[in-house]
Amino acid sequence: MNILTQKHLDRRFFLRGVGAAIALPALDAMTPALSSAASTSSGAAVPAPLRMAFTYIPNGVTIQDWTPMASGANFDLPRILKPLTPFQKNVLVLSGLSHHNAEALGDGPGDHARAGACFLTGVHPKKTAGADIHSGVSVDQVVARTFDNSMRLPSIELGCEDSRTVGNCDSGYSCAYTNSISWRSATTPNPPETNPRLVFERLFGTDDFNEDPATRARRSLLRQSILDVVNARTQKLVSTLGASDRRKMDEYLTGVREVEKRIQMAEQDNHKFTPSIEKPAGIPEHYSEYVKLMYDLQVLAYQADITRVSSLQLGREASVRTYGEIGVPDPHHAISHHRNIPELIDKISKINTFHVSLLAYFLQRLQDTKEGDGSLLDRVMIVYGSAICDGNAHSHGNLPVLVAGGTNGQIKTGQHLEYPAGTPMTNLYLSLLECMNIHVDRLGDSTGKLPGITTIA
């Protein structure tokens, strides 16, 4: 609240400057009586907004190193999930979920493409390498449509491995299927943005993304910090805020500045790196820093309430990325076909554990970001997993999947639940949509909501 005028700050307020529009984090000044939640006209409290995130891991996992031995709340985290130990009470591990429509169903090879296309849709994609691709609307886009008119960005789609979207990428399946897990419609995938610089501009810059590369490069050389562009307006706003809101603004703007600097450093250091895959400008040298930057951008987007839903592909299906920084120089896809060779299985487990350690970083960042009387971790539910169980067998049953976050108290985390073999993964999505107050009768091959995971009556 503006202490001098007793007026509340609009939740959709932006700090605007030439070429920049910065949304604000949740402030006490945006809610009546400095409460952590808004109120309806009747005075009833409105819960802080819930966000939904999806993180996809390619090529499956070593399922025996992923699955807890015990069910219920008294379980130990296995090797791959061990990095989540500090957040075990915020994690729900699910076994038995499947994507039947990622199976061949008479279409022959192409499990990686089907897995990517099916993960958020539950739909069997049409086998084609042409323009006549066909899958289904993904769960993240069901959320995006709900908030289309109230969010600056209905959704954000991120990736950590660049890929073309046309041509044949897997046994007669279009590259669109391996490159995108988000689908706006049955025929329109949402290719992920892999360049952190462009993600940052989409979140905080103006809509100038149709510029040619040469013009964009010239503007980059002359670029001021986005925060410098809105500096005068920021100082004027901060002078009207209470002590708590000034602290929140300082933390938020510091986070924006740090991300901006890391992107700039990555751009400057780009010429020093010769990766095994093509790398666009603005991507950090080390994969771990790349993923952390993409997670940080999601934290900023949630903190400013720019969007309520995001997706991140840690790698596209059939990824051949190497992981030299953890001692695995072999191409990921090749060693996922481990042929039960212990050395290769161990390398896959190392990659899987490395990926989970980066998820733990995301959870820590969310926990460290305060919102109202809690943190962003309390206001988010993250689905992390794959549509391939074992890369060697290309199996799509008993998938590695977990839900993490506080979920506004609506998901019964801190446990391992086992479901009958063949239970559709899309049943999980129906339950999570209910937590967002989005009621959908069917998604892909769903047969009903997943029992036992929500606190919703």
Image: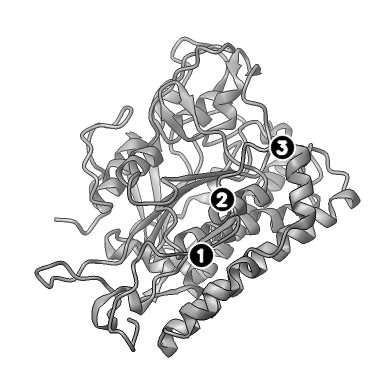
Percent coordinates x, y for residue 333 in the rendering:
69, 33
Point out the residue furthest to the left here. Answer: 42
What residue do we see at 23% from left, 51% from top? Answer: 437
Label whose residue precedes the other's in the sequence (3 or 2) = 2
Label 1 crowding class (10 Å Cα cut-off): few <14, some 14-19, many 20+? Answer: many
Point out the residue furthest to the right here. Answer: 272
Q: Quadrant of the C terminus?
A: bottom left
Dot 3 lies on which element? Answer: loop
Q: Nearer the viewer, residue 188 or 100?
A: 188
Q: Nearer the viewer, residue 32 or 60?
A: 32
Residue annotated with mark 1 = 363
Q: How far is the residue under mark 3 from the one under mark 1?
A: 33 Å
Q: Quadrant of residue 240?
A: bottom left
Q: How far is the residue under mark 1 from the one under mark 2?
A: 29 Å
Label whose residue precedes the other's in the sequence (1 or 2) = 2
Compared with 159, 455 (above or below) is: below
Q: How far is the residue under mark 3 from the one under mark 2?
A: 52 Å
Residue annotated with mark 3 = 341
- Is any part of residue 207 visible from this angle? yes
Q: How is the image coloured?
A: one colour
Percent coordinates x, y for residue 337 in the rendering:
67, 31
Q: Quadrant of the N terminus?
A: bottom left
Percent coordinates x, y for residue 28 in the rendering:
35, 79
Residue annotated with mark 2 = 206
What residue do we see at 54% from left, 32% from top? Answer: 180
Left or right: residue 240 compared with residue 168: left
- Between label 3 and label 1, give the one nearer the viewer: 1
Label 3 crowding class (10 Å Cα cut-off): few <14, some 14-19, many 20+? Answer: few
- Between label 3 and label 2, give the one nearer the viewer: 2
Q: Nearer the viewer, residue 59 or 287?
A: 287
Dot 1 lies on which element? Answer: helix
Q: Nearer the viewer, residue 184 or 319?
A: 184
